[in-house]
Structures are given as structure tokens and as C-alpha cells.
Amino acid sequence: MTTTWRHLPAPVREIAVTATDAVDAARARDAEAYRPAVARLATADRAGLVLGGVVRLLLEEGHPDGLDGDDVRQVLERCVRAAATWWPEVDPHILLVLLAGALGVYDPGDDDAPPDPAAVARHAPLLVADLLTVTGRPFADYLTAAFGEVARTELHD
């Protein structure tokens, strides 16, 4: 069964559709489908924020007792090794920045060259696809939860 996102406002629906396409292509290790999917994802406003929420949720579920440095290194190594077999453009540093950002320990103001939205769009789906192998739940569940968290945060700000 495929999740439809018709009930969402157009900008949010664009994130949902493009993120799903990119994560599906990453899970299938299909570079031909991944390239245009991440190009579209890079143009979706706030996609990085939503995917950061997805990564955080996946990390929390996959590591219910918390993460330590070894856990982060293991996630990073597993993701890089898996992605490099079909997406040679994978950059471990960008994946590390995404992990740190999802964990709330990365401040882009302290980084001389923080990843741009295109770099985030090219790497976040790789990380999400890898983390989904641990939890076994559908991506749509995490995406829906991340949208909810973003909405709650915006409501309280």
C-alpha cells in the first residue's frame, strides 16, 4: 500500500513526495532514480528540517538507551559503506554533520562551511534509508511524526 499525501498543504506535500522518492531510491540503491529525486528534494523548502526530525526519531528508536560515540561511529560507517557501493559521491563529513544536527549537537554558526541544502538533500535520504534497516518500520510513519513535531514546534514559537 502506498501512502498518499493529498491531505497536506502543497509545500508540505512536496517535501513528503520528494523525500519518499529519494528514500525509496536510496533503499533500492538506484542511482538513476536517486539523482533527480534529491535534486527535487533540494528545492523543497524546509526539507532538511523535516528529514533531520526523521533521522532523530530513527536514532531514538534504534538506540532506546541513548547513543554514545561508538554508536554514532557505527551508524556513520555502516551508512557510508552501504551508500558507497552505488553512490560514490557520499561524503562522510556531511553525514556526520547530519547526525550531529539530528542529535542537537551541531551549530552551523560554528562551521566555516556548513552543508548547503543540496548537500543535505543528497545525504539525508542515504542516512534515513540506512537507519530504516534497523527499525523495519515504514518511512511514512517517521515522516508523519516529523511533520507533527515541526508543526508543534512552530505552534509554540
Image (tube, rainbow, N blue to C red):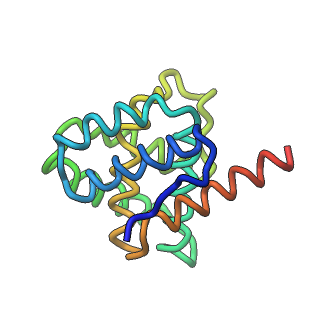
Q: Nearer the viewer, residue 110 or 57?
A: 57
Residue 77 lies in quadrant = bottom left
- Say above or below: 116 vs 120: above
In this picture, residue 24 sits left or right of residue 135: left
Residue extending farthest to the left is 85
Which residue is at 53% across, 40% downward?
47
- Say above or below: 113 vs 77: above
Total marks drawn?
A: 0
Q: Nearer the viewer, residue 86 or 24?
A: 24
Residue 78 image point, x, y percent: 28, 60
Residue 48 image point, x, y percent: 52, 40
Residue extending farthest to the right is 156
- Say above or below: 24 vs 47: below
Residue 98 image point, x, y percent: 48, 45
Residue 42 lies in quadrant = top left
Residue 85 image point, x, y percent: 13, 50
Q: Nearer the viewer, residue 24 or 63?
A: 24
Q: Nearer the viewer, residue 84 or 19?
A: 19
In this picture, residue 31 sits left or right of residue 119: left
